[in-house]
Image (tube, rainbow, N blue to C red):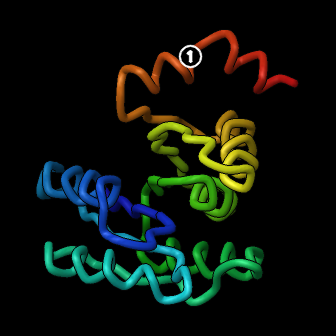
Amino acid sequence: MHIVHLTASTFFGGPERQMLGLARALPSDCQTAFLSFAEGGRSQEFIKHVRWNGFDGAALKRDTPNLPAATWELASRLHNARADVVLCHGYKANLIGRIAAHALDIPAIAVSRGWTGENRKVLLYETADRLHLRYMDRVVCVSAGQARKFASPEFRRAERS
């Protein structure tokens, strides 16, 4: 099985450590690679750690605001890597990853870490993410608390509206 993680990493922090920890914990017959949106060059710190840990890692050449081009670049990279599944980390990865994966008829799985609503811009992105999660093939919550939020009737009502 070949798993590709997709993220929009701007530094090497907790979520990035979780991704690498998961990759290291998988059986040896699972190949893991990492792709990140370039984020103006800020993804290089994460890509550097990915490679230090012995995994393939690269930044996409295309990014915001040209998301259609990023989607097709991602689909091409997933196809060339013979990906069996794409694990999407974050709202941008969820949206672009799902479209690219479904174009190739491979599953797209969202990893949901939670929502902070720290400012209006983030709140807007997180709202779009919550609405979009219903289209993912699966959603993995990284904590019991997040799973409760995701399964709550309030979330489901907001999702339908």
- Direction right: furthest residue: 161
- Residue 15 lies left or right of residue 43; in this view the side is left
Q: Residue at x 60, y 13 (%)?
A: 152
From what the image shows, is residue 20 above or below residue 37?
above
| Residue identified by numbered label 1 | 151
Q: Where does residue 66 sit, x and y in percent of width and height?
A: 76, 81
For badge 1, the amino acid type reads: Ala
Relative to residue 123, is residue 139 depicted above or below? above
Q: Write the residue at 71% across / 18% down.
A: 156
* Image quarter hosting the N terminus: bottom left
Question: At which x and y percent is residue 83?
Answer: 43, 65
Rendered view: 38 above or below 28? below
- The one nearer the camera, 82 or 23, is 23
The residue depicted at 48 percent of the width and 40 percent of the height is 112
Left or right, 119 with respect to 15, comes to right
Residue drawn at x 58%, y 75% is 74
Q: Position of residue 139 (x, y in %)?
A: 51, 35
In which quadrant will I find the C terminus? top right
- On screen, 116 above or below 57? above
Residue 106 on image: x %, y %: 55, 54
